[in-house]
Amino acid sequence: MSQEFENLVAVVTGGASGIGAAIAQRLHEGGASVAVLDLQPDGADAAHFAVQANVADTASVRAAIAAVGEKFGRIDIVINNAGIGAQGSIADNDDDEWARVLNINVTGIARVTTAALPWLQKSPSAAIVNTSSIAATAGLPQRALYTASKGAVLSLTRAMAADHLREGIRVNCVNPGTADTPWVGRLLSSAADPAAERAALNARQPHGRLVTAGEVADAVAYLANPRSGSTTGTSIAVDGGMQNLRLRPE
Ligand code: NAD
């Protein structure tokens, strides 16, 4: 039996850590050749083609996508996963920080996808998956700027899906709940009481624990799979029920 991603080439931004690394591994296991585009590509698994790239910089993105095209001669799947966090209410980040985070989390998707578009347009099974967040669909405290960026990712996903449907390119996103990645590890270690903070985050998820990066990767693999040909312009929540469920306390 052929593998689901056999002969396909996938680009995963932010693929050297956390959710992106799990996605890169999952696509590789499914038979894809994977290129990891990351600010810090040294962390990428040796199985992948790792390219240093900053999604906030057009020249860097263009060079990285050109390197992938040269190496593999095709690009079929683009996973726009690179992103950074921001904490606080709207009053807590200055204009420069707003511009910086939106540039990476939102414009970065436009940049990477635009650079890869000529390749995707030639692919018989082109798919883009963007990493949004539970923050796009639920109001979380102290995450104003980050939420604005991830809400934009969700809306942008639909707009991209509409624009590129007739070119045969599907576009979807995943909305992870709080996931156990190095990012969240950093947040926890900076908290006054990391154990209490972890317990509070676990308790916020109806299923009582953090999401794993592998669970997000499996949802991404479903959306990227050529067999998901009728799935475009949508989002999959991988959040332990956080968005849609209202359980009574035990
Ligand atoms: P992470 O910090 O573990 O990994 C992020 C990776 O992106 C790193 O390898 C980093 O070097 C890379 N990166 C950062 N800025 C970059 C840039 N400008 N150009 C290229 N690469 C860059 O984070 P993670 O937790 O795996 O998060 C990945 C994505 O998932 C992000 O978009 C994040 O918003 C989203 N997300 C995370 C969670 C969570 O709880 N961890 C929840 C929902 C959504």
Image: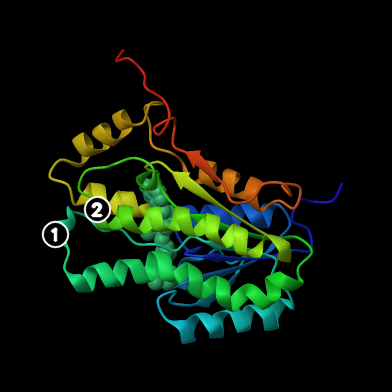
Point 69% across, 83% down: residue:
70
In the rendered image, is residue 40 in sight? no
Q: How crowded is mark 1: few (under 14 residues within 10 Å), some or many (20 or more)?
A: few
| Residue linked to disc 1 | 92
Indicate the secondary structure of the residue bearing disc 1: helix
Q: Which colour scheme is used?
A: rainbow
Q: Which residue is more in the foreground, 187 or 224?
A: 224
**Residue 14 coordinates in the image, percent (x, y):** 47, 64
- Answer whether labels 1 and 2 touch (C-beta < 8 Å): yes
In the rendered image, is residue 187 in sight? yes
**Residue 207 coordinates in the image, percent (x, y):** 41, 26
Q: Quadrant of the C terminus?
A: top left
| Residue linked to disc 2 | 144
Splitting the image into four quadrants, where does ligand 1 fall? bottom left
**Residue 145 coordinates in the image, percent (x, y):** 26, 58
Amino acid type of disc 2? Ala
Indicate the secondary structure of the residue bearing disc 2: helix
**Residue 44 coordinates in the image, percent (x, y):** 51, 66
In this rendering, would 88 be left or right of 21? Answer: left
